[in-house]
Image (spheres, rainbow, N blue to C red):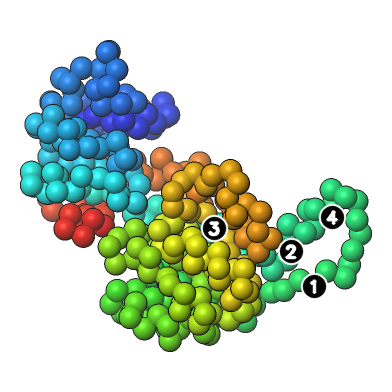
Amino acid sequence: MLILSTIIPNESIQTKMKDAFSDLNFIYQEKWTDEPQWTDEPLSEAEILITYGEDLTEEVIGKATNLKWIMVMSAGMELMPFKAIEDRGILVTNARGIHKIPMAEYTIGMLLQYEKKMKLLMKNEGEELWDRKIEVGELNGKKMLILGAGAIGGEVARLGKAFRMTIMGVNRSGKPVESIDRLYTLDHLLEALPEADYIISVLPSTVETKDLLQKEHFKAMKDSAVFVNIGRGDLVNEEVLIEALETKELAHAILDVFDPEPLGKGHPFWRMENVTVTPHLSSKSGEYLPRTFAIFEKNMLEYLKAGKDFINVIDLSRGY
């Protein structure tokens, strides 16, 4: 059995895969077939593809005539050719959930950075300015609203509880989630927004979530609210967000995702004092690939015994 991966992990992970599945053939290469030294042969023979997802096209799926399973080593999959995959009945699993630790730590870290005025303190340090009159805040006692109360949102909530915050959440079902005090469905979002000190979005990019946040949502927020987006940039039209920030409908936005990316030079977000920009790195961690290959290993064992209890099976009709 051939497993073809366009993700090239370190030698330690490659050795671990070889030891765990000594009868299988793993090929690691940067692209599917684009370079002269990479022929179509491995792709046409491969039964399993390992990828981040962005390099999959209908053409690649068409050439992978033996393909049965795609392991996507990320959570976002909006660029994948789902119809071509669904037409072939190919199994797709992803790495949903592995981002929860770094993304939750990023979220709490950025909220602390905001409340403790770390950007100002670092600026003052560079200028050798001693100013003890700076007003700093606390997370303690604040209310946090999490849009997308899944694995990542649940971990953000769990850490938020350590700071004695009240946690509200929004998901499709409105069903209870551990560490979240109150759950709302998306159609009741406007009811929850006026209470929140922090609004955290971890929502994926779907037909339902694209441009979900409109002017009315920002008008409903406290003027002291902080909006954090670590999900996808197309959750809100940037002009709507810029207007809300300029008119002080909220206090600050912490943005790790944008539409499009990368954020261009000269964009207003770079210059706005009430915006913190980071380059889509909230999910980054040195533990990323070890965790993704651990999921692959468990699913591979299930696949070899022709089981059906896979981790993170994707609903191809929904794209997540």
Q: Earlier in the sequence, mark 1 or mark 2?
A: 2
What's the amino acid at mark 3?
Answer: Leu
The residue mark sitting in front, 2 or 3, is 3
Which picture quadrant has residue 124? Answer: bottom right
Residue at the outermost top position: 37
Which element carries disc 4, helix, strand or loop? helix
Residue for badge 2: 117
Residue at 42% of width from left, 76% of height from top? Answer: 169
Residue 219 or residue 110, whichever sits in front:
219
What's the amino acid at mark 1?
Answer: Glu
Q: How crowded is mark 1: few (under 14 residues within 10 Å), some or many (20 or more)?
A: few
x and y, in percent, of residue 243 in the image: 55, 68
Residue for badge 3: 255
Q: Is residue 78 visible?
A: yes
Per the model, the C-alpha gap separating discs 1 and 4 is 14 Å
Numbered circle sitting on residue 135:
1
Per the model, the C-alpha gap separating discs 1 and 2 is 8 Å
Asked if residue 155 is positioned above or below residue 64 in the image, the reply reads below
Residue for badge 4: 124
